[in-house]
Image (tube, rainbow, N blue to C red):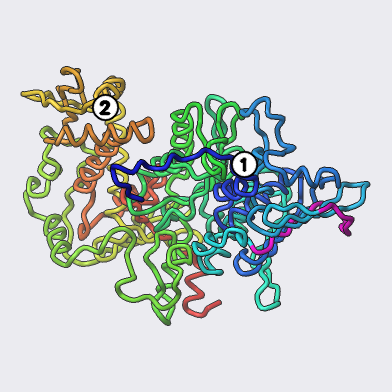
Amino acid sequence: MTLHSPAEPAPRPVIRQLDEAAINRIAAGEVVERPASAVKELVENALDAGARRIEVTIAAGGKNLIRVRDDGCGMTADELPLALARHATSKIDGSDLLEIHSFGFRGEALASLGAVGRLTLTSRVAGQEAATISVTGGRLGPVAPAALDRGTVVELRDLFHATPARLKFMRTDRAEAQALAEALRRLAMAEPHVAFSLRDITDGREREIFRVDAETGDPVTALGNRLAAILGREFHDNALPVDGSREGLHLTGFAALPTYSRGAGVSQHVFVNGRPVTDRQLTGALRAAYMDVLSRDRFPAAALFVECAPQLVDVNVHPAKSEVRFRDPQAVRGLIVSTLRAALSGAGHRASTTVATETLSMMRPGPAARTGDAGGLIDEEDHPARGVATASSIHAWQMERPSPRAMSVARAAQAPGLAESSFGFESAHGLPGPVPDDLRSARLSGTDMPSARVEKDTFPAGAEALPLGAARAQLHGNWIVAQTETGMVLVDQHAAHERLVYERLKRQMADSGVAAQALLVPEIVDLGPGAERLLEVAEDLSRLGLSLESFGPGTVAVRETPAILGRIDAAALLRDILDELEDLDATTALPVRLDAILSRVACHGSIRSGRQMRAEEMNALLREMEATPGSGQCNHGRPTYVELRLADIEKLFGRR
């Protein structure tokens, strides 16, 4: 900041018109942030041109060279200079900015790239001769004849040579190449019927680092195969097809099982009308759909595609077109949450195949298998560094193994002869009144042996043909071993029963509602301008047991709170709800708290580790798991069972 003495007046700034080159360089800073941005713009242009094969070649992470070749409709020689002009496009006529059916429409990409790099554009329309034009630092060259069989080739060299300050903010060649490849993969997910390839030139040698061929068949099959090629076969094998419609919106795609989760949000891909977007509302809705089956530190894996009329979404929010605004964001959120929950519920007791893969890898001799990711073995997405796992890097899902003291207390609580009240459901969760029979863990007399075997005459006939088979034994008072026609199933009795009890509690709450407890003295909370926003949803909150009334400007009175929550900080709860309303135009804070309480109640009311079970009890547990949605994982996202196929077990012993 320049300081001037009071006696010396500051010079008056003069308004002047910037030259065209400066304007283009400023615009380029918004459109082209890094090489990945340039590739995204050029590939989107190729897709808009109807290309069925797109080849990308880069050097030095895209900083020295980006070449995009396509087999689209091409451009004539007369159109080449116009294509490099700002705000020149063939995508729209400018009459209706909401009627957009293409990736590009702003007409800024080529002009911006030509302003900050050395750009050469070569194209040919079927039935005409090919032509080429070059632009360097915004200076346009003449149109000249060229040799090209079909389509368009855009070659960009020395990106940001006209703005060298931007080069200082570039990351390493490897990091830029990875970001560039990720941008291309996201576009390839949305266009399964188009072939993509990415080649890198290093030290004069060219190598292919990414390639997917055009898929055939119906859209769902083609999309599934494309996602398998990009996200991995494991994702495809553990993903559920998604399909739902609501109020002019259509949601399709694939969402992974809860037990195939990730330690970061790198496997969450959302598309709107085929356009990859980064939207907090959409990813927030994705997490909300998994909220009941995943721990908070886990992230679901999914590729979701929202389709709607162009008038229902505004894509002209940001020059990079990575953000969108929906006319009715609440409808989109509701569609994602309801459709995903229906798909997860339809999966029943199914758990991801990576659970068995990880189990078998731990049994094989050699270095300890790398664990710690709920999707199975650790992959490069979550842990780029390779190597043998250390003790600190090995985690058992989201929960640490109970301490020996905790295990002994659990065993003692289930020991025969103790009074029912010493471990009863009532004292565990502190709620008055009798406990339903189906929520109480049955007391059984038994032995103190760490394992129990199912006698032959109690083995249910035909049970092996069922998905979870027939119980054969109980090991160490916690693990149920069941035999199936194709192998065996190992069940965590506590985790499985915890999920079953939790689902029963939720059904009861849905049927009878949330009981509210009136406060002896209403709590007055000053929320300022947010009070009006909160009172607008007071009717919805009352159905969840939270009763609010206006108590003057900017103030609300809390009359009732959910009984199951006990004593709560009403002011903190209201501010959390208000923050969600401001951010997402919806609130899940109160339902989440209620579900968390039910989860803890279910944990106390489920079968404890160390408790012996009779054969009929174990088989009844297996049958209820088969009939209960979401029983493949406990309330914290851990798997409740592991299925091992006989062929894989035989391999462990060298029999195959």
Looking at the rendering, the stretch of residues picked out in magenta corresponds to: 142-158
Instruction: Residue 342: give x, y in percent of width and height.
Output: 46, 37
Q: Closer to the camera, 638 or 12?
A: 12
Residue at 73%, 59% in the rendered image: 155
Q: Tag 2's secondary structure? A: helix
Q: Give yes or no for contact between labels 1 and 2 (Cβ–Cβ under 8 Å).
A: no
Nearer to me, 502 or 457:
502
Tell me the kind of residue under disc 1: Gly
Callout 1 environment at 10 Å: few (<14), some (14 to 19), or many (20+)? Answer: some
Which quadrant of the figure has residue 585?
top left
Whether residue 283 sits left or right of residue 321 in the image: it is left
Point out the image quarter for the C terminus.
Answer: bottom right
- The answer, for residue 224, to whether it is visible in the render is no
**For this view, does 416 lie left or right of residue 283?**
left
Instruction: Answer with the quarter of the image where residue 198 lies.
Output: bottom right
Q: Residue at 83% of width from left, 54% of height from top?
A: 132
Vertical position of residue 450 compared to residue 524: above or below: below
Q: Which mark is residue 391?
A: none
Along the line of sight, the residue nearer the viewer: 249 or 49:
49
Local packing at callout 2 (Cα closer than 10 Å; few below 14, some 14-19, many 20+) is some
Query: Which secondary structure lies at badge 1?
Result: loop
Q: Examine the structure image and report whether residue 650 is included in the region drawn in magenta.
A: no
Q: What residue is shown with label 1?
A: 274
Specify the farthest residue to the bottom.
Answer: 366
Instruction: Please state which amino acid type lies under the numbered disc 2.
Output: Gly
Whole-angstrom CA distance, mark 1 to mark 2, is 37 Å
Is residue 143 covered in magenta? yes
> Can the viewer see residue 80?
yes
Q: Which residue is mark 2?
A: 530
